[in-house]
Image (spheres, rainbow, N blue to C red):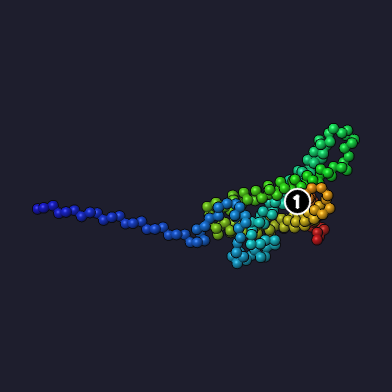
Amino acid sequence: MGNKPSTPPPPPPAPEPEPSPPQELAWYNPGGYSILFHKVKLEDYPWIKNTPMLTEYPGLALWELSMFRAVRYSCFVGFAVSPIAWYIQRKRLPFADRPLYKMHHVFFPSAGYSTFFGFAAGTVESMWTCYQEFGGPRPVWQQEKKLVKAAVIARMDKDNDRWCRTAGRLGFCGLTTTFFFWKSGGPFFRAAMGFGTGVTIASIASVTRLDRQVQLF
């Protein structure tokens, strides 16, 4: 009896290709900057139209809150440090020759530098917060949902809404006042100085609830 030729084993089945994710799950947001300026569709979130001061860019609402908060803190620090800087700058003069009425040359300009610092700090803080809370490897629709929810909660808070409105109005009044009537410094510096001063006054009015008793504009 002769040996029968052995048949080769069948080849292993080819692996099935993995199904591609749907289009809304395939794109991931790379970082906090794009999330901050991400535009959502209003038809997907109809309640945005009923939320005060909220647009199709919900990240900008969070950025506005961070920016106002940072400018408020930085200007308070600038105003507190300005008397010390005034007396250190004029330390060669006798103490009696350092009149306080001339301190406005340092007091109000400190708000200009503090406003630029607060604006930058608030922008970086909001971008970092957006990246930490809404970024990472998750689908876009999940990012949008969390982002819109956070923006709606922030805007629906009565204290936040009142504070933002007061800061925006008084900041604009201070900006226009120093821009046209302050004589020293460039236009951007004068505008920043007035804006920071207005936001600082607004923070005092908001903490003391004065903006609830007096209708501002």
Residue located 62% across and 55% down the image: 36
- Label 1 sits on residue: 188
Amino acid type at image mark 1: Phe
Left/right of residue 110 with respect to residue 9 in the rendered view: right
Whether residue 61 is visible to the viewer of this picture, yes or no, is yes
Dividing the picture into quadrants, the one containing residue 142 is bottom right
Up the image or down, 40 lies above or below 204; here it is: below
Residue located 55% across and 58% down the image: 140
Residue 62 in the image: state x and y as whole percent.
Answer: 66, 54
Whether residue 150 is visible to the viewer of this picture, yes or no, is no
Residue located 20% across and 55% down the image: 7
Residue 104 in the image: state x and y as whole percent.
Answer: 84, 44
Q: Quadrant of the C terminus?
A: bottom right
Q: Dot 1: what SS?
A: helix
Residue located 66% across and 65% down the image: 49
Picture mark count: 1
Up the image or down, 97 lies above or below 108; here it is: above
Q: Name the residue furthest right.
A: 96
Residue 129 in the image: state x and y as whole percent.
Answer: 62, 50
Dividing the picture into quadrants, the one containing residue 34 is bottom right
**Depth check, front residue: 13 or 34:** 34
Residue 205 in the image: state x and y as whole percent.
Answer: 79, 53
Q: Name the residue furthest left.
A: 1
Disc 1: CA contacts within 10 A as few (<14), some (14-19) or many (>=20): few
Dividing the picture into quadrants, the one containing residue 39 is bottom right
Up the image or down, 86 lies above or below 123; here it is: above
